[in-house]
Image: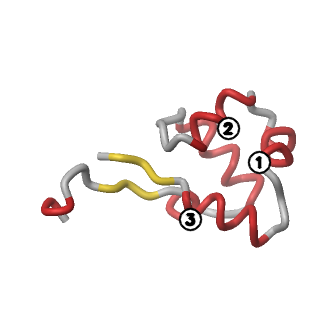
Amino acid sequence: MAVSYKKLWKILIDKDMKKQDLQKSVGVSWGVITRLSKGETVSLDVLIKICKYLGCDIGDIMELLPDDPKDV
């Protein structure tokens, strides 16, 4: 399964925020933001911090994508 954070980036656009704003507000390293940007996995703790800050649920900021589209 692949991870997509497109929903997170859409929320940031809607709130007129930059990735750097999120990084500072949530208190995570720039490396975490880079991993999110590349669609790599991050810890559940990081996702929870982001959700608390944005006032949303994990499903609102990410989704799991099947490796093979036939697996849907």
Q: Amino acid at mark 1?
A: Lys
Instruction: Report x, y in % for residue 29.
Output: 74, 28
Disc number for residue 19: 1
Q: Which residue is mark 3?
A: 60
Instruction: Report x, y in % for residue 60.
Output: 56, 65
Ranked by sequence position, the earlier of labels 2 and 3 is: 2
Q: Residues within 10 Å of mark 1 (few under 14, many from 20)?
A: some
Disc 2 to disc 3, C-alpha distance: 17 Å
- Which residue does the image show at 47% across and 53% down from the upper left? 4
* Labelled pair 2, 1 in contact (Cβ < 8 Å): yes
Q: Amino acid at mark 2?
A: Ile
Instruction: Report x, y in % for residue 13.
Output: 75, 66
Of tags 1 and 3, which is closer to the observer? 1
Quadrant assignment for the C terminus: bottom left
Of tags 2 and 3, which is closer to the observer? 2
Q: Quarter-wise, where is residue 54 in the image?
A: bottom right
Disc 1 to disc 3, C-alpha distance: 17 Å
Q: Residue 30, relative to residue 10: is it above or below? A: above
Residue 3 is left or right of residue 24, and the answer is left
Ranked by sequence position, the earlier of labels 1 and 3 is: 1
Q: Amino acid at mark 3?
A: Asp
Seen from this angle, which residue lies furthest bottom? 14
- Which residue does the image show at 33% across and 56% down from the upper left? 65
* Labelled pair 2, 3 in contact (Cβ < 8 Å): no
Q: Which residue is mark 2?
A: 33
Q: Residues within 10 Å of mark 3 (few under 14, many from 20)?
A: some
Q: Secondary structure at mark 3?
A: helix
